Amino acid sequence: MSQKAHYEFDEHLMEALDQTLGYTPENIRQRIDSRLAWLAAMPDEERAAYLRRTMYPVPLDFTEEIDGTTYAVNAVFNDRSDVTMQEKAERFIASQQKE
């Protein structure tokens, strides 16, 4: 049985993505559908091995050396935050447009 995936995109977020990166709902859907079809065509064991290889098994942790000083950056997500990931993405996109 074939299922058609359904994706909904926020209009304002999509406008920002289109303006900054050239992403449209159509080409995002095509990329998602293409990747899902590719995964679905794999044998179960191969798909499981691929997903194990590509998942990020440890918390996000970055270090960067700037002018001889090493900075450590950790990603922390607050479960009780009243700001959604979409709002964070929109804020990030807006800040990139200002630069």
Image (tube, rainbow, N blue to C red):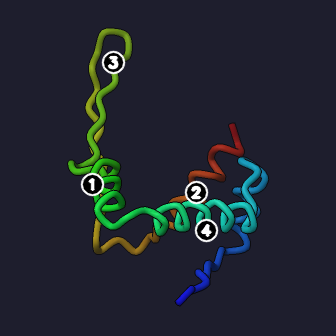
Q: Earlier in the sequence, mark 3 or mark 1?
A: 1
- Tag 1: Cα neighbours inside 10 Å, few (<14), some, or many (≥20)? few
Q: CB of mark 3 within 8 Å of CB of mark 4?
A: no
Task: Please tell me the numbered disc located at residue 91.
Answer: 2
Residue matched to label 3: 65
Tag 3: amino acid = Glu
How many angstroms separate mark 1 from mark 2 (CA)?
32 Å
Residue at image position (57%, 51%) is 92
On the image, the x and y values in percent for residue 33 come to: 61, 68
- Indicate the secondary structure of the residue bearing disc 3: strand
Task: Name which residue lies at 65% across and 74% down.
Answer: 9
Q: Nearer the viewer, mark 2 or mark 3?
A: 3
SS for callout 2 = helix
Q: Residue flagged by tag 4: what amino acid is it?
A: Asp
The amino acid beneath tag 1 is Arg
Q: Earlier in the sequence, mark 3 or mark 4?
A: 4
Q: Pick the residue in front: 71 or 1.
A: 1
Q: Earlier in the sequence, mark 2 or mark 3?
A: 3
Residue lying at the far bottom in this picture: please name it.
Answer: 1
Local crowd size for mark 2, using a 10 Å CA cut-off: few (<14), some (14–19), many (≥20):
few
Between the C-alphas of marks 3 and 4, the distance is: 39 Å
- Tell whether 33 sits left or right of 61: right
Q: Label 4 vs label 2: CA separation?
A: 27 Å
Q: Position of residue 10 (x, y in %)?
A: 66, 74
Mark 3 is surrounded, within 10 Å at the Cα level, by few (under 14), some (14 to 19) or many (20 or more) other residues, namely few
Residue type (three-letter) at the residue carrying disc 2: Arg
- Say which label, 4 or 2, has the lower sequence index: 4
Closest to the camera, between mark 3 and mark 1, is 1
Residue 33's disc number = 4
x, y (%) of residue 96? 64, 43
- Residue identifier under label 1: 52
Q: Position of residue 47 (x, y in %)?
A: 36, 60
